[in-house]
Amino acid sequence: MAVCYNCKTEFNGKFCPTCGAAAQAGPAPVQVAPRVAPPVYTNVSVAPPVASTSVMGWIGWMFLIGCLPLLGLIIMALAATDPSAKNFAKANLLIILILTIISLLIVGAMFLLGFGLAATSN
Ligand SMILES: [Zn+2]
């Protein structure tokens, strides 16, 4: 007694009477499971964790800025690895820039006012 691998009909002999498939010698071959491709882990570039600026780090930056007010901030904005420290330096530079522009405008206005007063007094 054999079972046709094709149509599952039980039969005796070398060929299946239903579909004509040849009887198999021995047990039916174990179906090989399709090889599942291993998951491909794409190299996701994980940025290394940025160390936040320590207390000593901040003291160092403050010391630098204290010694070199403008240059220290520029160095800090360029060299700091901590983005917060970088932003701190950039914010300070921006404030200095704005204050410089405002003070220049005031000085300029005073000059113009002075010239104007000098012109009208004569
Ligand atoms: Zn058959």
Image: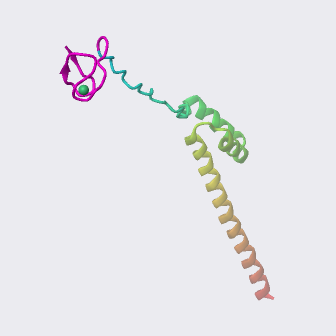
Q: Is residue 45 left or right of residue 31?
A: right
Residue 119: x and y in percent read 79, 86
The boundaries of the magenta stretch are 1-27
Which quadrant would the C terminus be assigned to in this image?
bottom right
User: In the figure, 25 relative to 35: above or below?
Assistant: above
User: In the figure, 19 relative to 88: above or below?
Assistant: above
Given the current orientation, which residue lies at the most extreme right position?
122
**Residue at 29 percent of width and 18 percent of height:** 23
Given the current orientation, which residue lies at the most extreme top position?
26
Residue 94: x and y in percent read 63, 55
Residue 81: x and y in percent read 62, 36
Which quadrant would the N terminus be assigned to in this image?
top left
Out of 64 and 78, give the one closest to the viewer.
78
Q: Is residue 7 magenta?
A: yes
The number of numbered discs placed on residues in the rendered structure image is: 0
Main secondary structure along the magenta-highlighted residues: loop
Q: Is residue 82 magenta?
A: no
Q: In this view, does 11 lie to the left or right of 77?
A: left
Out of 84 and 104, give the one closest to the viewer.
84
